[in-house]
Image: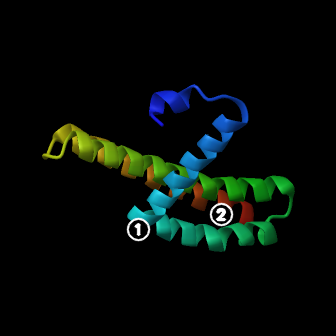
Amino acid sequence: MSAAELKGKRGLRRLINALGYSRDGIAAAWRNEAAFRQEILLAAIALPLAFYLGKSGVERALMIASIVLVLIVEILNSAVEAVVDKASPEKSELAKRAKDMGSAAVLLALVNAAAVWACLLWP
């Protein structure tokens, strides 16, 4: 089935297809990105800790969201890097800038997570 044929799907079939694409994206990130695997390890430790250390639902939600944000930004960074590598296999200042900005976004997400956890755990 082509992408155009899948795009026209509606209802439950569209949801099932979207879930499959998401599963494939997470699997690709796991297989191809060492940083994503490291961040999954961080999440495997941090998420249970968030339930244990959070004093309220809001605190737990903030702690969990900050960790999930790191995973989201890492996947987006990996997607940018893949597209840049495909579009510009030779060295290019624009390609370097795009990759560096994606890396900076991951760093900011990690700093954000650390700040959220620090603010909630050490008031």
Q: Position of residue 81 (x, y in %)?
A: 33, 48
Label for residue 46?
none
The answer to whether residue 122 shows anywhere in this view is no
Tag 1's secondary structure?
Answer: helix
Label for residue 34?
1
Q: Position of residue 67 (x, y in %)?
A: 62, 59
Residue 64 as seen in the image, left or right of residue 52: left
Task: Locate residue 80: give its quadrant.
Answer: top left
Name the residue furthest front. 1
Q: Where is residue 15 in the image (x, y as percent from the top left)?
A: 67, 39
At a point 76% along the width and 54% down the height, the residue shown is 61
At a point 48% along the width and 68% down the height, the residue shown is 37
Tag 2's secondary structure?
Answer: helix
At a point 54% along the width and 32% down the height, the residue shown is 6
Tell me whether circle 2 and circle 1 mark residues in contact (CB < 8 Å). Answer: no
Give the labeled residue for mark 2.
118
At a point 72% along the width and 31% down the height, the residue shown is 11
